[in-house]
Amino acid sequence: MHVRIVYKTINAEAPVEVVTTLANIVAWERRYKRKASEMAQAAGVEDLAFLAWEASKSAKVVVPAVFDDFVNRLESLEVAEELAANPTQAAPTDEPSQSS
């Protein structure tokens, strides 16, 4: 599961867009002692903020070292898109397609 998150911090000129990695999801599971499948059912704002914080660090975006300091600076936070973990396209075949 990869999530594109857009957030804006207080006094920032532009929003920041980050995409989570597998390592970010594992960090979330370790911190909150929950499985990612649970988050997929109902992600809270703190869950999204943590993923944004972790994804920002992974993307070399400068963020506060302490998570609560990051949260206190957030002005807005939203999921822009949930991406498939391994997007694939159907392989071409030699068989003609059947139409109804």
Image (cartoon, helix red, strand yellow):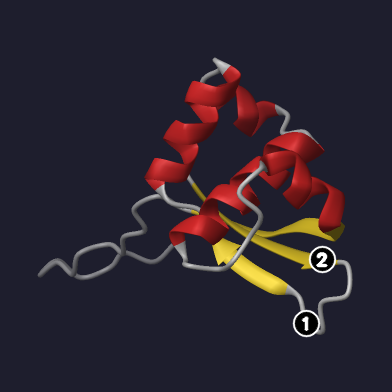
Q: Quadrant of residue 88?
A: bottom left
Question: Residue extending furthest bottom?
Answer: 13
The residue that disc 1 covers is 14
Instruction: Please state, as top left, top right, bottom left or bottom right, where the C terminus lies in the image.
Output: bottom left
Q: Is residue 65 at least partly visible in the picture?
A: yes
Q: Which residue is mark 2?
A: 9
Q: Is residue 12 left or right of residue 1?
A: right
Give the alpha-carbon distance from disc 2 to disc 1, as whole Å: 9 Å
Which residue is outermost to the left? 94
The residue under the point 82% across, 66% down is 9
Given the image, on which type of amino acid does mark 1 rest? Answer: Ala
Q: Position of residue 33 (x, y in %)?
A: 54, 15
Query: Which residue type carries mark 2?
Result: Thr
- Residue at (83% x, 57% y) in the render: 74
Which residue in the rendered view is the most extreme toward the front? 65
In this picture, residue 62 sits left or right of residue 69: left
Q: Is residue 45 above or below residue 38?
A: below
Residue 48 visible in image? no
Mark 1, other Cα within 10 Å: few <14 / some 14–19 / many ≥20: few
The answer to which image quadrant residue 32 occupies is: top right
Q: Position of residue 44 (x, y in %)?
A: 78, 33
Q: In terms of secondary structure, where does tag 2 sit?
A: strand
